[in-house]
Amino acid sequence: MQVQEVWGDRWQNCAHPLSHQYMLSAFKKKSAVVLAADFFKTKDISEMINSVGEYITAVKTHVDMIEDFNQESWAEVIDTAKKYDLLIFEDRKFADIGRVSQFQMAGYYDIRSWADIVTSHSISGPDVIDGIAASWDKVERIGGILLLAQMSSRGNLLSENYSKRTIHIGAASPHVLGYIGNGSSAEEISELRNMVGQGKLIWTPGVNLSAEEGVLGQRYGHPGEAIYSGSDGIIVGSGIIHSENPVDAAKNYANASWNALMER
Ligand code: S5P
């Protein structure tokens, strides 16, 4: 089987170069798992990547959660991720005006220098995208943005109309790699996929193979169902990192995502 057959129209229509890097990597690893490495110490992230790196395609970080951040400790995380050919995804959820977002990509954490992908809200309008892109330009790196079109948390304010307008903004920009969708609802993912079409990826958090509800309002759906409904990547944190056996868990999520892709 070839990579084009796995991804079908998505392979033809997604224009962002990182979308092809992602699809190819998922094809090679037989996994559409994005690890949410929600740790407080850099060494914990590196250790987790060393355990499950073969079964995941990207690692998602919240760098502002890290307690021992410095350039050296973070360089180790990045090197470890690169060893396993992972896309590095900083879930920064930018939301400010373009000019400020541009500088938030630099600063102490210097996200622009190591992140391949970042998340952004669309609440402030389209210029946040150009601000983020300008920052990558400055360091001569290629990056992709995932806009939050839906969220998995209960009671969130991202209405259907908001999703629609977010997709409108995203469709107009070559820097937008895709969207974050609500992995806890197959119905919402299908709706989102219908609105998005084939030209962008959808990645979905809020998936878990066992838990029905997470802490503090997180909602969960089945990872296979999320893919089947139109998601291209499942973002998994607790299901792997808080499992008794993260390696087995990562394999299980990888299999669930791959089997659903095959079925799709
Ligand atoms: O709507 C969202 C968007 C995101 S990016 N809901 C989410 O949960 N996320 C992120 O996905 C969140 O920041 C966390 O890192 C991860 C889900 O973690 P889990 O432990 O619930 O799997």
Image: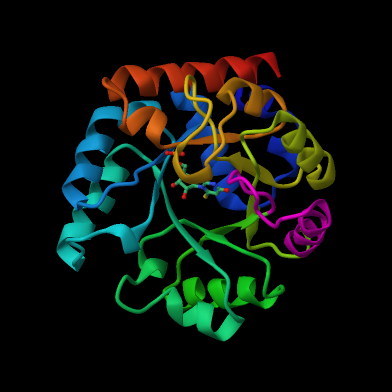
Q: Quadrant of the N terminus?
A: top right
Q: Would you say 135 lies left or right of 42 here?
A: right
Q: Is residue 53 visible?
A: yes
User: Is residue 150 inside the magenta stretch?
Assistant: yes
x and y percent of residue 116 in the render?
45, 56
Above or below for 43 versus 234? below
208, above or below 39, in the image: above
Which residue is rendered at x = 68% and y = 69% of the image? 123
Q: Residue at x 21, y 63 (%)?
A: 69
Q: Is residue 1 visible?
A: no
Q: Nearer the viewer, residue 221 or 168?
A: 221
Name which quarter of the figure residue 190 lies in. top right
Q: Residue at 62%, 48% (x, y): give it.
A: 151
Question: Is residue 106 found left or right of 124 in the rendered image?
Answer: left
Relative side of 106 to 161, left or right: left
Most foreground residue, 27 or 236: 236
Kindly identify the residue that appears in the image at 70 percent across and 45 percent down.
14
- In x, y percent, where is residue 188? 75, 37
Q: Looking at this view, is 171 or 25 the one in front? A: 171
Residue segment shown in magenta: 149-170
